[in-house]
Image (spheres, helix red, strand yellow):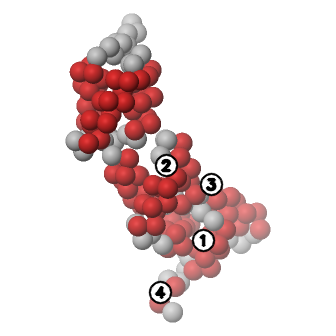
Amino acid sequence: MRKTTKIIESAADARSYLFDLLARRDYTRAQLVQKLMQRGCDPVIATSVLDSLESDGYQSDRRFVESQVRQRTEQGQGKRKIEFELRNKGVDNALIQEVLDSENVDPKRVALDYFKRRYGQSVAQTQNEKAKRMRHMVSRGFSYDEINYAQRYQIDDPEEF
């Protein structure tokens, strides 16, 4: 039996629904607007409730972006992929760049750490193997410079030189 979705008709309903969502994890403002619209919420009510939640500190796009950047970096994802995911979640480009610049993350170091985790000390012997590794790293959001750096220093730590 399928559960019916409740239509949101009042600000109290919208606030309660958003609190339930935000209790589990952070969302961007755009994601929350979309969820409210799917439930038939009036745009005026949605805006006022979201403004209230933001001013009270329950919802913050900055906090969401900082969390995502930290998490994705630790997972070994490159700057390009992180930016792409955040843009798809409705985050402003200026905020994304501001947070990425303030996090002091060395993208070459992230690429090297991930490359070592993924491939260890093994060096690609054939062009096909090198190309396969390159494609994998590009799909993780790393630039060619970062990938070349990781391949060059995968065996020796560059800080030892």
Determine contact: label 3, label 2, CB under 8 Å.
no
Residue position marked by numbered label 3 in the rendering: 139
Residue identifier under label 2: 92
Residue most toward the bottom? 161
Q: Earlier in the sequence, mark 2 or mark 1?
A: 2
Q: Nearer the viewer, residue 85 or 9?
A: 9
Asked if disc 2 and disc 1 are in contact, CB closer than 8 Å, the reply is no
Q: Secondary structure at mark 4?
A: helix
Q: CA distance from mark 3 to mark 4?
A: 27 Å
Distance between mark 1 and mark 3 Cα atoms: 13 Å
Point out the tag, 1 or 4, that comes first from the N-terminus.
1
Q: Which residue is mark 4?
A: 159
Residue in front for this viewpoint, 148 or 18: 18
- Quadrant for the N terminus, please: top left
Closer to the eye: label 2 or 1: 2
- Identify which amino acid the numbered label 4 is placed on: Glu
Mark in front: 3 vs 2: 2
Q: Quadrant of residue 5?
A: top left
- Tell me which label, 3 or 2, sits earlier in the chain: 2
Tell me the quarter of the picture where residue 133 sits. Answer: bottom right
Pick the front one: 114 or 50? 50
**How far across and how far down the image is residue 55, in percent?**
26, 42
